[in-house]
């Protein structure tokens, strides 16, 4: 069993299921345990997949990405990850795998499960399984041994099923050589550029054009909800002077942080840095005191429901912002995690929990809200006209590029059609496709087009938008590849291709199995993931 796990440690399925604490329970088996709950979202052979499991899977995915990216993970990034679709797919995929494994009579014994658990380094001390560590780890993960062992059994079933499916995957020498040449090969491209700016000068929109443009793109010009907040600030610096710092605390802090004061290899004596140590401790003490005061204030205001009265009693000055968009909070609130989410959920006059900023703590209250609205044309005419001219210029440039592509496909010559339009034909010189294109820049679509053109098919299907221009390519020449290095790299290339083909084989098998189950009426989705 350990051999199986080692052999598959790098493929996509094992990446999802190995690693007990981090991802193993999330992407494949995180939601398999637990009681049956209400509200089905799918049924496979009469066994329900329920909404509560979906919620847990979805939250697990969010937690994994938050741990991975921290505060760099924005709401926009979360939306782009399409986690609801991932969560539903994970649940359905694991149900399909278990169902197909049952039909194929793939079995795992209790001894197999025991061996797999004993092999986890997380449960070992000095290379030997330790029952106490095992139990402590599961308690920390809030998981009963029976549930964890059930998950391990499903994992091992999945590994065995995967082996059977991938057993026939092979990579030929020619496939490896083709990939090597594709990675090493350089090409030379001729190109022309049709500039958007060349069409902008002659565009003169009428008021009716602008009105229609604004109506068609209301979402683009709509001003989002704005909010005004009132808040109390408890800044660490305001409490730092009150912090009483003993000599013992200064000595202890200095000793624990000696490396912080080092000059070269040696730390200076305490006397030289005493003022700096005292200042650091003052800041820390000030933040602790500010935190305490903020918590006391929150509890009192929450009960009395009167921020102004508390501020007057404590001689604090409430501060009020102007209206601001939630995605553009005032500077002091930008570093606060989840500030936008917290404020967006507050009702008028409701106070937030204590929010920790970089230099202090805040209690926030919504003073007023301004609903989203679409400004009248006269208010934003300059911006509407600017965007209209840009959009129209881009449309005209695309039309010109499409016309030229059509002529070239019918046998026209690049130099000839370019000359008629006063366009310059340029050359990239030999380069290796995959990154930025010399003299043009970066574009995913452009990069993909480079692999589609050749001596027999010199032009791509369309022009490509790159940095304000539509670009038309023409294949010119292909550089020679030295195959001498292939022998040395062959094994690595074969291994890479094998992993890739195995990944695609598993994905295709799962999708095919799902489609067959749906067709036979054995798998039914009772809710669309968009409604979840």
Image (tube, rainbow, N blue to C red):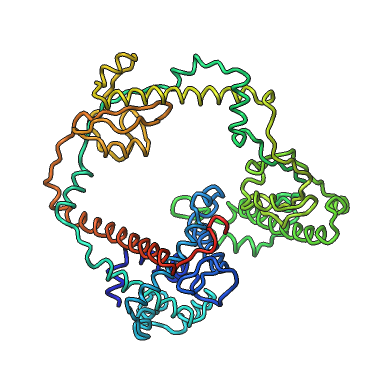
**Horizontal side, residue 454 vs residue 243: left or right:** left
Dividing the image into 4 quarters, which one contains the C terminus?
bottom right
Above/below status of 392 relative to 245: above
**Horizontal side, residue 508 vs residue 47: left or right:** left
Name the residue: 69% across, 62% down. 246
Nearer to me, 21 or 91: 91
Q: Decide if residue 1 is in sight here.
A: yes
Name the spot of residue 32 as percent of width and height, x first: 48, 73
Name the spot of residue 210 as percent of width and height, x first: 61, 23
Of all residues shown, which one is farthest toward the front? 520
Nearer to me, 218 or 403: 403
**Horizontal side, residue 41 vs residue 207: left or right:** left
Name the spot of residue 352 as percent of width and height, x first: 73, 55
Above/below status of 111 relative to 71: below
What count of labels does the image hold? 0
Of all residues shown, which one is farthest toward the left? 484
Dividing the image into 4 quarters, which one contains the N terminus?
bottom left
Q: Decide if residue 72 is in sight here.
A: no
Nearer to me, 322 or 258: 322
Above/below status of 426 relative to 144: above
**Horizontal side, residue 373 vs residue 122: left or right:** right
Quadrant for residue 433, please give it: top left
Name the residue: 59% across, 22% down. 209
Name the residue: 45% across, 61% down. 89
Name the spot of residue 36 as percent of width and height, x first: 56, 76
Quadrant for residue 385, please give it: top right
């Amino acid at each position: 069993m350990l051999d199986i796990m080692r052999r598959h440690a790098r493929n996509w399925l094992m990446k999802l299921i190995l690693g007990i604490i981090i991802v193993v329970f999330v992407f494949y088996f995180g939601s398999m345990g637990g009681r049956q709950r209400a509200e089905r979202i799918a049924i496979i052979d009469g066994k329900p997949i329920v909404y509560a499991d979906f919620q847990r899977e979805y939250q697990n995915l969010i937690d994994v990405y938050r741990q991975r990216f921290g505060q760099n993970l924005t709401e926009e990034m979360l939306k782009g990850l399409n986690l609801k679709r991932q969560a539903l797919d994970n649940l359905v995929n694991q149900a399909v795998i278990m169902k197909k494994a049952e039909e194929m009579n793939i079995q795992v014994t209790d001894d197999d499960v025991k061996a797999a658990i004993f092999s986890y380094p997380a449960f070992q001390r000095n290379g030997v399984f330790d029952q106490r560590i095992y139990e402590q780890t599961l308690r920390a993960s809030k998981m009963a041994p029976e549930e964890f062992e059930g998950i391990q059994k499903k994992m091992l079933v999945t590994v065995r099923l995967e082996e059977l499916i991938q057993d026939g995957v092979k990579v030929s020498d020619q496939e490896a050589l083709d990939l090597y040449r594709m990675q090493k090969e350089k090409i030379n491209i001729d190109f022309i550029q049709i500039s958007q700016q060349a069409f902008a000068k002659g565009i003169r929109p009428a008021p009716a054009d602008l009105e229609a443009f604004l109506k068609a793109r209301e979402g683009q010009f709509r001003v989002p909800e704005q909010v005004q907040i009132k808040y109390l600030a408890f800044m660490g610096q305001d409490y730092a002077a009150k912090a009483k710092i003993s000599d013992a605390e200064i000595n202890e802090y200095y000793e624990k942080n000696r490396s912080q004061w080092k000059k070269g290899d040696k730390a200076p004596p305490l006397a030289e840095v005493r003022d700096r140590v005292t200042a650091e401790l003052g800041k820390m003490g000030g933040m602790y005191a500010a935190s305490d005061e903020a918590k006391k204030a929150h509890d009192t205001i929450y009960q009395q429901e009167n921020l102004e009265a508390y501020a007057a009693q404590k001689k604090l000055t409430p501060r009020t912002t102007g209206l601001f968009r939630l995605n553009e909070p005032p500077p002091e609130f930008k570093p606060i995690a989840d500030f936008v989410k917290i404020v967006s959920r507050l009702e008028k006059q409701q106070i937030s929990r204590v929010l920790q900023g970089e230099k202090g703590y805040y209690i926030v209250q919504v003073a007023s809200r301004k609903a989203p609205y679409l400004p009248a044309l006269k208010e934003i005419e300059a911006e509407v006209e600017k965007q209209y001219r840009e959009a129209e210029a881009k449309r005209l440039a695309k039309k010109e590029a499409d016309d030229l592509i059509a002529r070239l496909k019918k046998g026209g010559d690049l130099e000839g059609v370019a000359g008629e339009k006063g366009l310059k034909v340029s050359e990239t010189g030999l380069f290796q496709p995959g990154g930025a294109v010399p003299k043009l820049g970066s574009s995913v679509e452009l990069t993909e087009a480079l692999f589609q053109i050749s001596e027999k098919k010199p032009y791509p299907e369309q022009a490509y938008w790159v940095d304000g221009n539509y670009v038309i390519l023409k294949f010119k020449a292909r550089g020679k590849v030295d195959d001498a290095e292939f022998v040395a790299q062959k094994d690595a290339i074969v291994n890479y291709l094998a992993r890739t083909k195995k990944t695609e084989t598993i994905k295709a098998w799962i999708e095919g199995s799902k489609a067959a189950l749906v067709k036979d009426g054995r798998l039914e989705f009772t809710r669309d993931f968009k409604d979840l």
